Structures are given as C-alpha cells and as structure tokens.
Amino acid sequence: MAMMSLFHPLAAAATDIDLAAVYVPQPALADWLVILPVVFCLLTGALLAMVRKRIGLHAPIALLALAALVVIDALLLVRVLSEGPATMVLGRWLPPFGIAFTVDLLGASFALVAALVALAAALYGARSVGPEGQRHGFYPFVLFLMAGVSGAFLTGDIFNLYVWFEVLLISSFGLLILGGSREQIDGAVKYGLLNLVGTTLFLIATGYLYAIFGTLNMADIASRASVDHANLPLGTLATLYLLAFSMKAAAFPVNFWLPASYHTPKIVVSALFGGLLTKVGVYALLRVLVMLLPANGASLNGLVAFVAISTLVVGGLGAIAQADMRRALGYMVISGIGIMLAGLAIGGEKALSAVIFYGLHSMVVMAALYFMAGMAGRLAGFDLARMGGIYAAAPGFSAMALMLFLSVAGLPPFSGFWPKAELVSAAIGTGHGWLAGAILLSGFLTTFAAGRIFILGFWRPAETALEPFAPPAGTIPALVFLVALTIGFGLWPEPLMVLARQAAEGLVDPSGYMRSVFPGAGA
C-alpha cells in the first residue's frame, strides 16, 4: 500500500478514486491454500529441471512433491466443505480487476483425485520409465502437467482457464514424444493438430465473451448472464465453447485424435492422459454451460444428447473392434466421455451429481487400466491375437484386471455402477428414456469389449510358456492403490455421492461461488 501511495497519489487525487475500494486486505494464511497446488507444482517442476543431470534425485523429489500435493488438495477440500467456496486474488486487486483463483467443491474434488492419480503414476514410472526417459524430463513434465491440471480446476478466470489448458498441453506434448520413436512423433502430430484447433476455438470464444461482458471473471460473468441472457447474443458463444471443449474431451465427431495418439507414448503417460486430460475438458463444459451460461447451455441439450449418444456408440464399438489392447482402452475413454455428456444433456442436480461421480471414478479406473495394460503387455504383448496365459502366470494380477474391467463396464460392486445407475434413474425420471437406453447399451458394449480382452488376453492359454511375472518395482503398489480406490468407491459410495451432490448444487446455484468472489454482494 505504501508503494501505491508513493507512485499514484496524484493520479488518485485527479480521478477521485479510492484505491482502498479496489484493493483487498492482506489475505489470511489459509487463503494461500487456493493457489498453493499450482505454485507448488511449478516450483517443484522447475527444481527438477535445474537438477536434470542428477537423475537419481528426480523420482524421490517428485514422489514427495506429489504426496505433498495430495495433502494440500485434501486440506483445500476440507476447507471448502467446512467454509464454502474460497477465493484468492492475485495482486490483491478486487475482482474483476484482479485475477481470481476460486475453488468450490467441484474444483477441489477433481483436483484431489487428479493428484492421487498423478502420485500413482509417479510411483509407477519410477522404474518403468527408466533412466533415459527420466533424463529427457519425465518428472518435470509430470509436475508441470499437474500445475496445468490444478490451475484449470482452481481458476476463477475464464482466460486463465485457457492459459492452464496451454500449460498442460505443452507438458503433454513433452510427455507424448518421450522416447522419440516414429510412432510417438506420428501420434504427437495428430494430437497436437486437433488440440491446436480446439485451443484456437477456445481463444476465439473467450475474445467474443469479453466483447460481450467486458470481464473474464467467472463469478462476474455468471452474475451478468443470469440478468441479461435474453438480450445478449450468447447462443453462438455457448456453441463455440461446446465445440472447443468437446475437442478437448474427445467427444464425437472430433474424437479420432485420441485413439490415434494415446497408445503411442509410454504406458504411464497414456495412464495420465486417459485419466486426467479428457476430464479437464468435461470440467470446462460443466463450468461454462451449467454455471456461466445456464440458459444457453440448456438450449443446447438436444445437440449435447446427440453428441453423447454418438460418442457412447463410437466408443463402445471401437473398443470391440480393436486388436491392440491399448487402442481398445482409448475407445473406453471415449465411451466414458459419452456417459458424462449424457448427464450434461439430462441436466438437473441428480444427473450432474452422477456426472461428477463418474468423472472422479473414471480418473482412477482409466489410469489403473492403462497401468494394468502396461504390465500385461510386458508379459504377453498388446496384440490380442497373440496374447494369452496371463491368468495362469499371474492369477492375483489377473483378478485385479477383472475388477477394473467390471468397474469400467459399470457393474456392481465397483465404482462405475453407482453413477451409471443414477444417470439411468435421472434420465427415466425426466423423460429421457432414449438416453437411458443409450447408457445401458454403452454398458453392454463396454462389458463385451472388456470381456473380450480378458478372455483373449488373460483367460485363454498361451501358445508358448510366458516368462515369470516380474513387473518393475513400484508398478504393483501403484496398481493396487488405484484398484483399492475403485473398490472403496464401490463398496462405500455414500461419501462420494454426497460430495458429488453438493458439488452439483454449487454448479446449479452458484450464489456461494459468487459471494466468495464478491463478499459484499447479495445472493
């Protein structure tokens, strides 16, 4: 404040501006939790880049950092549960002048589960990536990726959502080409091209939004759109965001980049991508179409429903048609996106809470499936025509694989069952029987695809004896950790269901979010 009064007394006097009215007091220590996940990941990633020649330090530092990130995100979630949404404004300028980080239950829960998945991936990659991959920046890229993912979940500014998308995309490019094989470069080109188009559309839509509202603060936009939505040209804006984020989420018909690229990098990288990146696209859709532009988002429900059904069918049939297990998992990721889009099309707190539950489940299960595929491929290859004998060689590992297949198919008693059941109930209750039928059809197709993989790759006897099952150190604990989560979510779903319901309520009625950003404003 002293510096402000030193450099700006004449300007303040000339314009009669009360600087105290736009300058926030010193934030409480607890408020720093809101931005700490992003800052912590950026600083740790920079530290790892600085000691890039001391490869032996990378895994321990990254594991400690990601364990600390889990603790930070857990504390943040506890704070939001007890006190409501929290806001931290950079530069101490009041919103909408200052850039705000605002966290509610949706952002905090997604950030925590993403950190758990990243911790498991760091543990899995400690031995499976190898010294060469670590020398080329595996762990710094993972930390920078988590900075982008955390920033996307915690930001309260729509342009900064674009910025954090860019941070995670740049990091994902580095992870995608780790190893430099011809197949990886080919996958990276396809991945980069479509994401560049999506990013461009996102930037165009954000420029259009700023031209309409004159602000980029999400709470400010939600407040203004709720008053003036009938008099503003918001239909085109909502459609642009739908297209941009659908590309990020790999929804039909802009989904073909995912199965063309996700099978090419190291399996731990595929696990991070399949578990986290598409969920950031779904999160952005929820934030923009439900909270910021609810009336215009609702007007697109018919289009979203068509996209959802198409995505479900393409994902299920694509998974069945694949001869490579990694490609089949890519289509299962796409099918899961269709499930979440179906919930977005249904609308209402019940369907949206199921979407949030499914998103958290999918982060865990898809990452675990890729971990499982990496270990199975190391033992018997990825080609289903040549695989076999894994159950005889590793029955315990095969049992975990079966649990994951049942969970991704949405069968009880695993975590995928509950959100699908909630979505079907919500669809029938709101007269969307055809969407309920599509969700059930998707479950059948995914069950068929998963059963095919298990029978051909695990249950069928091997043509030649397999080597003893000896996965790299750290891979089994990482897989067991994620399998335990999906079993826990399935056997004890009530806490997650309550959390998802409260997060959905905060999306539909963002008054608490707005009061966090503008404490002096009414509901």
Image (cartoon, rainbow, N blue to C red):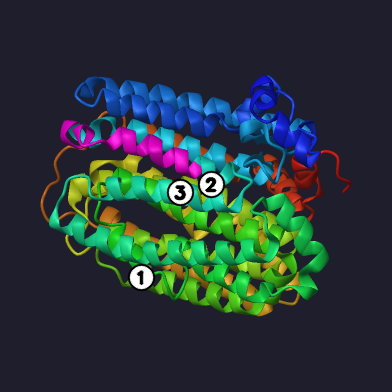
Mark earlier in primary sequence (3, 2): 2
The residue pinned by badge 2 equals 152
Marking on residue 256: 1
Q: Position of residue 506 (x, y in %)?
A: 75, 49
Q: Say which of 275 and 257 sits in front.
A: 257
Is residue 107 in view? yes
Graded by Cα atoms within 10 Å as few (under 14), some (14 to 19) or many (20 or more), the crowding at tag 3 reads many
Q: Is residue 123 left or right of residue 24?
A: left
Query: Which three-letter amino acid code belongs to the residue tagged 1?
Result: Phe
Mark earlier in primary sequence (1, 2): 2
The residue pinned by badge 3 equals 276
Mark earlier in primary sequence (3, 1): 1
Q: CA distance from mark 3 to mark 2?
A: 11 Å
Q: CA distance from mark 3 to mark 1?
A: 18 Å
Q: CA distance from mark 1 to mark 2?
A: 24 Å
Q: Position of residue 267 (x, y in %)?
A: 28, 47
Query: Which three-letter amino acid code belongs to the residue tagged 2?
Result: Ala
- Residue at screen point 71% across, 36% down: 11
Graded by Cα atoms within 10 Å as few (under 14), some (14 to 19) or many (20 or more), the crowding at tag 1 reads some
Q: Is residue 330 left or right of residue 473?
A: right
Do tag 3 and tag 1 residues touch (Cβ < 8 Å)?
A: no
Residue range highlighted in magenta: 131-149
- Residue at screen point 67% across, 27% down: 4
- Residue at screen point 77% across, 41% down: 15
